[in-house]
Image (spheres, rainbow, N blue to C red):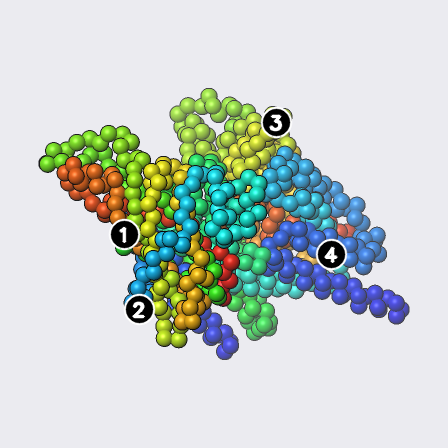
Amino acid sequence: MNKLKLLNRYSAAVTFLAFEFFALIAFNYSGSFVLFGALSLALCILLILFNIGEIKSKGLSNVALFFIPLFLFTLLTAVGNYNIAHTQAGDFSWAETVFIPLGLLPMAFNGYLLSIDKNFKLKTFIMVVFSALAVYVLINFVYNLISFGAFYPLFYKNFYLYYDGIKSEVPVSKMAYVLEGFKFIEVKMSHYVLYPLLLSASSVMLLFTSPKKEKGYFYSFLVFTVLAIFALTFIPSTLSLGGLAAVAILVLVIYLGKTFVKTRTVFKFILIALVALFLLGYLFYVIVVATGISNSFTGILNRLFVSNRFSAIINPNLEGIFSSAKFLGFASWPVNYYPYYEVAYPTGFFIFDTFMTSGVIGTVAIFAFVFLGFVSFKKYFYSHKDEFRLQATILLLLIVFVAYSAFFNDVDYALYYKLYKPIYLTSPFTLMVFMFSYVICKTRVDVAVVEEKKEEVTNA
Amino acid sequence: MHKRFKYLLLLPVVAIVSCGYSTSYFVEGDKYTSANFKENYYKHWDEELKKSTKFDPLDVTDEAYIYDYGYSSIAALPEFGIIDPNYFDSEPLIEEYGKEFKMGAVDDSFRYGYQSKLYDGQMVCGAQNGMDGKDGRPDYTYQKGRVQTSESGFSIRFSKESNELHYFAIQFKASTDNTREYYTVGGTEYKKQPDNALYHDSSIALTVTLFLKNNEGIVGYPFTINVDFDKKSTNVGAHYTFVAFDLTKYKTDTFSFTRLVGVSVTYKVLSDELIDYNKDMGVEDVSYDDYALFLYEMFFPYTSWN
């Protein structure tokens, strides 16, 4: 009995350690993917040791299948032409390459382990992640104010900053400071916006938390939300304001969907229609351009698929991806030496860059993982295993991250430093892998999953 | 709202009055990168340095090390005693000297601002190879390396104070506005012959003023060096003039060479074959205002900074 008590106590300590790890990752601590990967692996080993009994009883076999897409993605990314070429060129280290599968897979497995861990409280997890994110956002925000002043993007549209004798690539209005590692570095505005946007997902919590019953919790999230809004509006850009508006709309949709059953059905149809339309359009675009059919297009089709400013960036990365040279990914600028002749520029769209970084199979795999994650939310919501507000916050956080990285992921975001970071080497991606995995596993472990049932109108 | 959270309201107030200390480093649009030669002169003067008292200039032409050299033949540099004679024992490369002694390596604050061109270790123009490491991207070619200055010069206020100074070195070349397509003699406009501005003799009296801080304030110590440019060094690409002098030689009881806070570079054109020739020919609108010194790098080797 005493032994069991002791084990329980240590088990709680390990869960606490897990929170610490997540805080470090959310804080983008030291900006090093190797560190995040190593932490994931260490945490995974600890959690396995303390949950070995649980793993046996709560069938790993139920969820093992769902790790296959991520396994494929990480493996193909690590051994793909892109990663090997850039590692040889010194853009990434070998350690980073090793930790793509060795860091991200344990992270996904942590999702499973913590979904069966009795000590793991999602409420605490959300609080920890947002607190760390808030500290990071606050530091960046304050540093930008000290350096450039409030609303500087409005005033310095035609001003440049010289560093080491080199004129900045973009005007001051399109740059910002971000803490990377232990140093503030100049980055493109789109990269600065990511973290406050993720933080703004905390706003959904306010609608479903009572300021009287849970004073501390409510006001903490109020601070997070206000901070996110300040960080986005005091340093305004099209992306920051547009992103904020999009998050506001999503919060409203979640609120209305939760409150009114009828709107939920409408939203469901709209959502399915939009996603289906996007996926069909995307697939069609990729196939048509990759196979070269688009070259024979004329008129409006030519304008849509070939001669617009987005196609000019995207198409070179899609051409020939089904051929043997590009099938397993291809090197991109600035690597341009033998044997990596298939050079293209990163597009800034993760949905297209992933062909470059992970090849065709890797792309299908990561799409499958993300799609599976989002589909699992339906089951997750009906399972009532976690509070709705926590589920909604995770959903919003994931939507924000996936939407942002799909369209605004710049691998070369640092202006002066040689920092070449594809999305899978960043801290938010590591967190995303955990959250998707947690949601996928939570709905599938512990057989007593509540089947879909009509819910009465409930108010928070 | 909870009492404590009224402090949240302070955040926007703080944000609005935030200082923006980096704004002094901002450079407007295409300033200094214009196609018009005369718009590219760097003329910034720090007010405090401008007002400071200055000693009479000290002519150090005889003691200074003045060297005209080609792109890859800096082998003779050890002669002036600044560096280890074995430093360039193998393939002497100018980049190595730049990397070793650049002021940008002292502290990150030296890396900001337009004047950081003088601290980046890039001692040549680097027009061909795009030295920002971003191959394939447009760069500002010949403007990248150098700071173009007129006779009235400019001053730099350092973000740090030095400890004891040892040496001073500067790398530059000179040129005139040879981009003009037309010139006028006696009211008639002539089209300039191609390449006629290249390859000519020129000489200047360069004045480098070191601004040192003492109990009474900032005092300027000007050093003058007469430089006769080699024909090549005036205008041919990849030829530069390197000037260095040993400051410890001029140390006195009152003149200790510590606490350097700024430096200014001015010069006087003594003669310029091309401009003088045009003047003699009667070309209008030609003067020493068309003359420019292109500074590439400035060094204070072996000096530590606080």
Chain that bears disc 2: B
Residue count near mark 2 (Cα–Cα under 10 Å), binned few <14, some 14–19, many ≥20: some
Name the residue that disc number 1 marks.
B268
Residue A430 x/y as whole percent: 64, 51
Q: Mark 4 points at which residue?
A: A43
Dot 1 falls on which chain?
Answer: B
- Cα–Cα span, label 2 and label 3: 70 Å
User: Relative to A442, is B235 above or below?
Assistant: above
Pointers 1 and 2 within a single chain: yes
Mark 3 and mark 4 lie on one chain; the one further toward the N terminus is: 4
- Amino acid type for the residue under numbered disc 1: Lys
Residue linked to disc 2: B53
Judged from the image, the secondary structure of the residue bearing numbered disc 4 is helix
Same chain? Circles 1 and 4? no
Crowd around label 1: few <14 · some 14–19 · many ≥20 (10 Å): some
Q: How crowded is mark 3: few (under 14 residues within 10 Å), some or many (20 or more)?
A: some
What amino acid type is highlighted by mark number 4? Leu
Q: Residue furthest front?
A: B62
Q: Residue at point 50% right, 53% down?
A: B82
Judge whether B59 appears above or below B288 on screen. Answer: below
Measuring from the top left, give residue B192's x and y in whole percent: 22, 31
Q: Which of marks 3 and 4 is in front?
A: 3
Q: Are marks 2 and 4 on the same chain?
A: no
Q: Mark 4: few, some, or many residues within 10 Å (few <14, many ≥20)?
A: many
Q: Image point 39% across, 57% down: which residue?
A: B25
Looking at the image, the residue that sits furthest to the bottom is B3
